[in-house]
Image: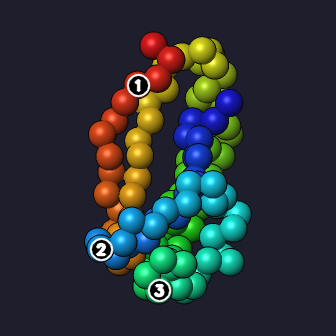
Amino acid sequence: MKAIETNIYGIKCDNPNCDYQDMTVKYEDYPNLLNKPCPKCGDNLLTQEDFDRTETLVHNIEMVNKLYEKYGLLDNVSPDEPRVVVPVEMDGTGNMKLGELRVEGK
């Protein structure tokens, strides 16, 4: 069990006039999409700024999980405990927009 789990997937065009998205894209495939044109409008599909910010987020989450593991902070937490889910969207500038928090497994 981890303190923070990531479920990073999907790609969408940041062009407000384009509705292209592919939610089957996996995080592992992001390097292959870096600075590639949107198949629908031709705009940049994944900017360096968004990619770098995502990599930083993943790195920080890994560090938090290592600290929780090192100090046994989850040893007495049941895997059935409710989880807080926070959707994150990016806009091509490296800025993150947090969606509405929701609790699952309650």
Mark 3 or 1: the one toward you: 3
Residue situated in front as seen by the camera: 39 or 77: 39
Q: Which of the two residues, 20 or 76, is positioned nearer the viewer here?
A: 20
Q: Amino acid at mark 1?
A: Val
- Dividing the picture into quadrants, the one containing residue 13 is bottom left
Can residue 56 be seen?
no
Colour basis: rainbow
Residues at circles 2 and 3 in contact by the CB criterion of under 8 Å: no
Which label belongs to residue 103?
1
Mark 3: secondary structure: loop
Q: Earlier in the sequence, mark 1 or mark 2?
A: 2
SS of the residue under disc 2: loop
- Front residue (pair 16, 81): 16
Q: Earlier in the sequence, mark 3 or mark 1?
A: 3
Residue at the disc numbered 3: 42
Query: Which residue position holds label 2?
Result: 17
Instruction: Confirm or deny contact between disc 1 and disc 2 (CB under 8 A).
Output: no
Report the side of 33 relative to 105 (left or right): right
- Residue shown at the point (54%, 78%) measured from the top left: 39
